[in-house]
Image (cartoon, rainbow, N blue to C red):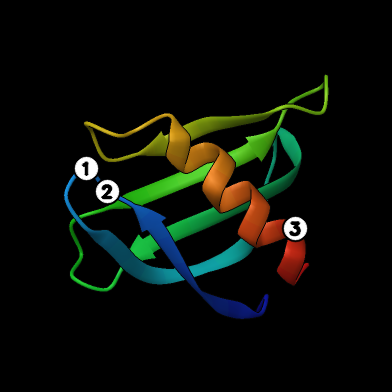
Amino acid sequence: MKQQFDATLTGTDSEIDGTAQQITHADYSEAFEFRSIDGTLHLVIAKDEDGEWIRIDGTEPYLSSWIDELAEQATSHA
């Protein structure tokens, strides 16, 4: 299993604490999954063929800024 790390995303009115880990995804070489501690937020991001981080799964609604926040935290833990 991939190493899990603590991650925090900035919500509209507070920070959202959770855990993230690198996951294996058939369509992408690099992908990460975030799950909030309270279970309200799930986000999966992956690097597309152009090297850009994109959201590929998760709960709705979501903030697009979370993609960059999670990618930054994920790459610093990889």
12 horizontally vs 57: left or right: left
Q: Quadrant of residue 54?
A: top right
Disc 2 to disc 1: CB gap under 8 Å: yes
Which residue in the protein does label 2 denote? Answer: 11
Observer-side mark, 3 or 1, equals 1
Where's the N terminus, which quadrant? Answer: bottom right
Which amino acid type corresponds to the residue marked 1 in the rendered image? Thr
Name the residue at 66% across, 48% down: 31
- Could you tell me residue 61's position as x and y percent? 22, 31
Q: Quadrant of residue 73?
A: bottom right
Which amino acid type corresponds to the residue marked 3 in the rendered image? Thr
Q: In this rendered view, identify the residue nearer to me: 42 or 68.
A: 68
Q: Please tell me the numbered disc located at residue 27.
A: none
Name the residue at 73% across, 36% down: 28
Mark 3 and mark 2: span between their CA atoms?
A: 21 Å
Residue 38 visible here? yes
Where's the C terminus, which quadrant? Answer: bottom right
Which residue in the protein does label 1 denote? Answer: 12
Which residue in the protein does label 3 denote? Answer: 75
> Mark 3 or mark 1, which has the lower sequence index?
1
- Could you tell me residue 57's position as x and y percent? 43, 36
Name the residue at 18% across, 70% down: 38
Residue 23 visible here? no
